[in-house]
Amino acid sequence: MAKPSDPLLELETQAQPRCFRVIANARAGAVLEAGAESFARRIEAAFDAAGCRAEVELVPPRQLQERLRAAIADEAVTTVVAGGDGSINGALPVLVGCKRPVGVLPLGTVNVLGRDLGLTGTLEEQIAAVCTGEPVAMDLGSVNGRLFHSISGMGFFSLMAREREYARRRFPFSRLVAFLFAATRSILFTRSIRIEMEIAGERRQVEADAVLVTVNQFDGAEWRRSRLDGGEFEVHILDTGGLLSRSKAAFSMLTGGWRKSPHLVSLTGTSVTINRRDKRRGHVTFDGEVERGASPFVYRLLPGALRVIAAQPVESGPHPAEHMFPS
């Protein structure tokens, strides 16, 4: 019998393909469009083609955390979360405690985090990038203990996220039609919010159409972060003052010219506190997911809280028109 130090045994061990366990949201659009069995076979075949192996579990959203815990506990596999930004957000309470790198397989409409990690192109290209990728440290944000990986917002952004959910049910045949319907309603019906904000030791009282808090800085043209471990929040306060100005500001966010808007103020800091001056409970988005809560909203940064697999090298590419409103 060969001993553990036997060179032949070591060579055989090294030759074993890397094994992944893919936990996928069974309600993701890509899964529903292809069919569960067909989609699982496609993922397995793509990992095989990239020189790896994969076990695929398609689970309902409510079971996502449970199955992730089981996958993370198995040290023989590398865990991969497959789904949109909202699905990845829902997995954060489990992933943040993982001491090993985890993978992401973007299956949403916009895939903000996937693009930051260089996971673009076809499903097969994304899987190949995960197989050959390297782990990178990633900051997370929390709002009163509620985690998010990329974007949190209120005002126009929370209304847009709610309208998108409604529009998706009303126009299931076209994502573009649903998006345009939601965007139009959000522009028409957004009402300004009065807030008191504290960031970087400075207090501000503002009336704004929207407030957006991002984990690290996004560039203006592509809405992509060059660093996931920059160690800061960036807060954008948008006060347009009217329907026409709001429409122009929304268009500039879609086309990449938003940083030049005269209605935008941007600030950076490692912690942010936002109070609604009307004392009402308000809607807040977390990577496209919407919840209702009461002030104060206390944002805290968790530096390097997660290690994720990024494509190497990360190549830039254009974002779709919906990049501001992750699924």
Image (cartoon, rainbow, N blue to C red):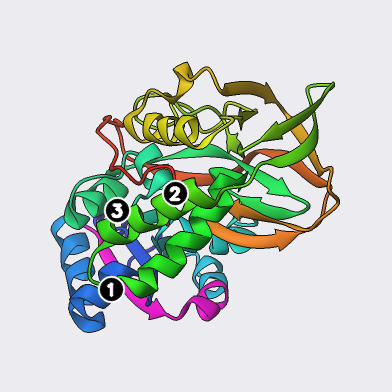
Q: How crowded is mark 2: few (under 14 residues within 10 Å), some or many (20 or more)?
A: many
Q: Name the residue under label 1.
A: 31
Q: Position of residue 72 (x, y in %)?
A: 53, 66
Q: Residues within 10 Å of mark 1 (few under 14, many from 20)?
A: many
Residue 94 drawn in magenta: no
Q: Residue at x 42, y 80 (%)?
A: 59
Q: In which quarter of the image is residue 45?
A: bottom left
Residue 325 visible at all: yes
Q: In which quarter of the image is the C terminus?
A: bottom left
Residue 14, which numbered label?
A: 3
Element on which disc 1 rests: helix
Residue 108 visible at all: no
Q: Give the range drawn in magenta.
A: 51-66
Which residue occupies the foreground of this view, 87 or 304? Answer: 87
Type of residue at label 1? Val
Q: Mark 2 points at which residue?
A: 325
Which residue occupies the foreground of this view, 113 or 21? Answer: 113
Residue 63 drawn in magenta: yes
Element on which disc 3 rests: helix
Q: Could you tell which of marks 2 and 1 lies nearer the N-terminus? A: 1
Instruction: Point out the frontmost of discs 2 and 1.
Output: 2
Location of residue 173 with respect to 162 vertically, above or below: below
Q: Position of residue 186 (x, y in %)?
A: 48, 51
Q: Which residue is drawn at 58% across and 36% down?
A: 214
Which residue occupies the foreground of this view, 131 or 7? Answer: 131
Q: How far apart are marks 3 and 2 (CA)?
A: 43 Å
Q: Which residue is drawn at 28% across and 43% down?
A: 320
Q: Position of residue 1 (x, y in %)?
A: 33, 72
Element on which disc 2 rests: loop
Q: Distance between the residues labelled 2 and 1?
A: 21 Å
Q: How many numbered markers are drawn?
A: 3
